[in-house]
Image (cartoon, rainbow, N blue to C red):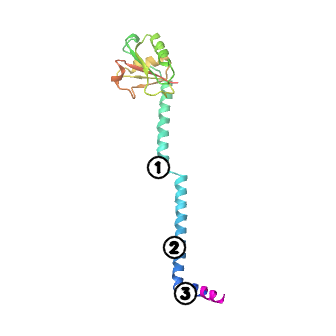
Amino acid sequence: MDVSLQNDSLFHDSPLVRPWRTAAIVAGAVAAVELLLLVIVGGALIAKPSTSTGVRSAARAHATSAAQRAVVGRTLPVAASAAHLARGEVSVLVLNGNGRHGAAASTAARVSHHGYRIRGVANASSSDFTRTLVMYRRGFEAEGRRLAHDLGIHIVGPLDGIRASQLHGAQAVVVVGA
């Protein structure tokens, strides 16, 4: 036993071991400091993501301003100027934007009841419209607003997502929402 203790104490007290032990302790301390810095930076990024927050707030501001414009549009008079065409001269395309069977056909019957000509009834490109809206071709804003007023629709705007060539000659489009 005495020999093993002597060998062990010789190994730890050897001048070759001391610099390596010091280097290992310093490297461990540096690694601990780096780990601490990574935890702090990672926590800060998780707690407050700067880029995505800015994008989200800009999107919210845009959506809020669009919603405010829609609300303002409801309180203003629907017809900004007098329509140039009589109701019987205005062609309307009715699109089903809610996916319910027969929704566009029943809306087309209401449109026709008010004296407008039905140019066609079809499905919209998507069936996730939550609100019914009226869109009009360039130069037919007054007719589009009058159509919206006749049907009690509050969202009115120029063509968006539909090209004039897809209207088959219609001046206005009614997209039926939920």
- In the foreground, 157 or 23: 23
Residue that numbered label 2 is attached to? 27
Three-letter amino acid code of the residue under disc 2: Ala
CA gap between label 3 and label 2 equals 21 Å
Spot occupied by residue 39 in the image (x, y as percentages of width and height): 55, 60
Span highlighted in magenta in the image: 1-8
Residue 119 magenta-highlighted: no
Main secondary structure of the magenta stretch: helix
The answer to whether residue 103 of the structure is visible from this angle is: yes
Q: Which mark is residue 81?
A: none
Is the C-beta separation of discs 3 and 1 under 8 Å? no
- In the foreground, 2 or 16: 2
Task: Kindly identify the residue that appears in the image at 42 percent across and 25 percent down.
Answer: 157
Residue 172, by quadrant, is: top left
In the image, which is nearer the foreground, mark 1 or mark 2? 2
Residue 4 magenta-highlighted: yes
- Dot 2: within a 10 Å radius of its alpha carbon, few (fewer than 14), some, or many (20 or more) residues? few
Residue that numbered label 3 is attached to? 14
Task: Kindly identify the residue that appears in the image at 47 percent across and 33 percent down.
Answer: 66
Secondary structure under tag 1 reads: helix
Spot occupied by residue 88 in the image (x, y as percentages of width and height): 39, 10
Is 43 situated left or right of 118 in this image?
A: right
Q: Which mark is residue 51?
A: 1
